Amino acid sequence: MEMPRSSRTIMLTSLDPPGTKRPIPPPLAFAPKLDRHGIRDKLRKAEPFDTLPRGLIPSRRYAWGPPRLLYGWPAPEQLLLSYARKHKIVQRFRRRIVMPGTLNTSVDEIIRTEGVADISCDLLRVSATHMGMKDDNLVYIVAVYSNYDLKRKDLPSEETISTIRERLGINEPPKWYLDVAQWYWQRW
């Protein structure tokens, strides 16, 4: 029987090495009482992490779960919208394009259906973040996993992540972005 993976010893290139004690900068630092004033501006100015600080790896040893962070890239919206139009998979509501659904379907079709990479559909997703927002428009992220997925055995390899990046025409390495839906610490 295989022992469960400990959040203290998980080894991935996307994480700080075990034993690293990097402080978590505000507004992501733990705060049981959330100051909602100005939080959006603070999140908008926050930079994504190159590697995830160990303090943001979820662990039941603590009473609070960290915010959800997504490992991926800003979505190449024009490429994904063009693909959706060409393949007639644009999702609409009242004649308006539903961006998250359309981008998600396009990514799924390009990566999984076309056989670019073998990755679980619940790992590969398009989500949004406040990080890097301009003009009050959320930034869409193509994520290959989140900090809550780190103990899974089916995480994509570095090679798979690189293949996905290349197929989507993205040049920069993946980073950790805050998920718009779960950007705060919460009790388990």
Image: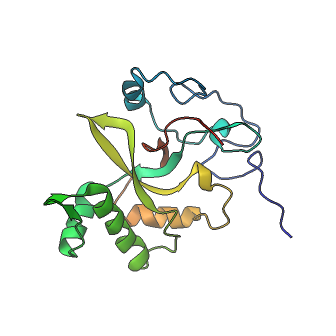
> Which residue is more in the foreground, 176 or 38?
38
Q: Position of residue 124 (x, y in %)?
A: 47, 63
Q: Position of residue 5 (x, y in %)?
A: 77, 56
Q: Relative to 166, is 130 above or below?
A: above
Tell me what residue is drawn at x 32 percent, y 56 percent.
100
Snapshot quadrant of residue 164: bottom left
Q: Position of residue 137 (x, y in %)?
A: 26, 40
Q: How is the image coloured?
A: rainbow
Q: Position of residue 159 (x, y in %)?
A: 55, 66
The outermost residue toward the left is 95
Q: Quadrant of the N terminus?
A: bottom right
Q: Relative to 83, is 69 above or below?
A: above
In this rendering, would 24 be left or right of 113?
Answer: right
In this rendering, would 179 be left or right of 2?
Answer: left
Q: Quadrant of the C terminus?
A: top right
In this rendering, would 52 be left or right of 18?
Answer: left
Examine the rendering and report whether any part of residue 173 can be seen.
no
Total numbered badges shown on the rendered structure: 0
Examine the rendering and report whether any part of residue 55 can be seen.
yes
Tell me what residue is drawn at x 73 percent, y 51 percent.
10
Snapshot quadrant of residue 96: bottom left
In this rendering, would 15 be left or right of 119?
Answer: right
The outermost residue toward the right is 1
Tell me what residue is drawn at x 44 percent, y 24 percent.
36
